[in-house]
Amino acid sequence: MPNRVRTAVFPVAGLGTRFLPATKAMPKEMLTVVDRPLIQYAVDEAREAGIEHFVFVTGRNKGVIEDHFDRQYELEHTLESRGKLDALSELQKDLPSAGQSSFTRQQEPLGLGHAVWCARELVSDQPFALLLPDMVFQARPGVLKQMMETYEQTGGNIIGVEEVDPKDVSSYGIVARGAGPDSGFKITGMVEKPKPADAPSNLFISGRYILQPEIFSLLGEQTKGAGGEIQLTDAMQMLIRTQDFTGVKYAGKGFDCGSKLGFLTANVVFALDRPDLAEAFRNEIRGLI
Ligand code: UTP
């Protein structure tokens, strides 16, 4: 049996420049899909997968994320006194329990790899899940849970992947697929943003990982990669020389809410999936198009 994965890391220190001016004073991870912030979807997905320790790598202007995962006594009291008990229980079930959350700071946004490295003392010497909160998924069970089921069989490092239109591979990290089924195949290599002609597949790395702690010493070398940032993919490319990486082509679909198009699409798809909104929203859209 591989070591259990109890800790998840959520890097939330990026600048979110693609969403300016919305992200000037508000973190991108607090943008909402219907009525829940992006970070809440990621935390819920991690909890469903059995995670017990939630590590947030925050930065400047991100204090509201910490507040979001804290209790708001005034609000709770007001909801209770007004008899809005459904809203109250909704708020309470969203929270990690006392002592389950940790926060650390990435003082400068030097890249995703650097943000992950900032979590090293909190994660310590154990495997951990990594969830990029700007990706939200329609998947049942959740993507991390599907990956966790594979991890229990294989151990090692796991990367969640999804198909992308081959002409769009140059926007993503792409894996090379070796032997094995969709639920767990050998990853033989990975490449960041390849030209379509050079891409080893059309399977993109969609922001969900289970990683072994050896990644931290590789990230600690602080080598700058594409865009002058410390890239996670560069460290994984080194780790794959000595450790197994397994790909999971999960059942479900991801939406890149760090891009305007992905964010707008996610809002439509998730609203149409909500029993309390679907019918009225469908009628509104029909009237518009
Ligand atoms: P992105 O690659 O989407 O970058 O980060 P970004 O800076 O947030 O957004 P744009 O590209 O400027 O619009 C993916 C995830 O990694 C985090 C982000 O907060 C996001 O959740 N991240 C990125 C960090 O925590 N630190 C970094 O230095 C970079």
Image: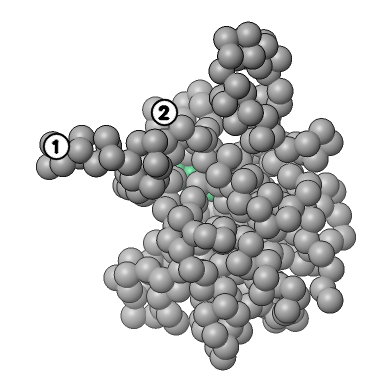
The label shown at residue 22 is 2
Q: Are marks 1 and 2 in contact (CB under 8 Å)?
A: no
Q: Taking 49 as reference, is 172 left or right?
A: left
Q: Residue at x 52, y 69 (%)?
A: 250
Label 1 environment density (alpha carbons within 10 Å; few <14, some 14–19, many ≥20): few
Residue 213 appears in the figure? no
Give the amino acid type for the residue marked by disc 1 in the picture. Answer: Leu
Which of the 4 quarters of the picture holds residue 146? bottom right
Q: Is residue 214 above or below residue 102?
A: below
Q: Which residue is mark 1?
A: 288
Decide if ligand 1 comes within 8 Å of the CB at mark 2: no
For marks 1 and 2, the one nearer the N-term is: 2
Q: Residue at x 69, y 41 (%)?
A: 57
Q: Taking 13 as reference, is 212 left or right?
A: right
Front in this rendered view, residue 68 or 240: 68
* Coloring basis for residues: one colour
Marks 1 and 2, Cα distance to the nearest angstrom? 25 Å
**Rendered location of residue 159, percent (x, y):** 60, 69
Q: Taking 11 as reference, is 207 left or right?
A: left
Give the amino acid type for the residue marked by disc 2 in the picture. Answer: Ala
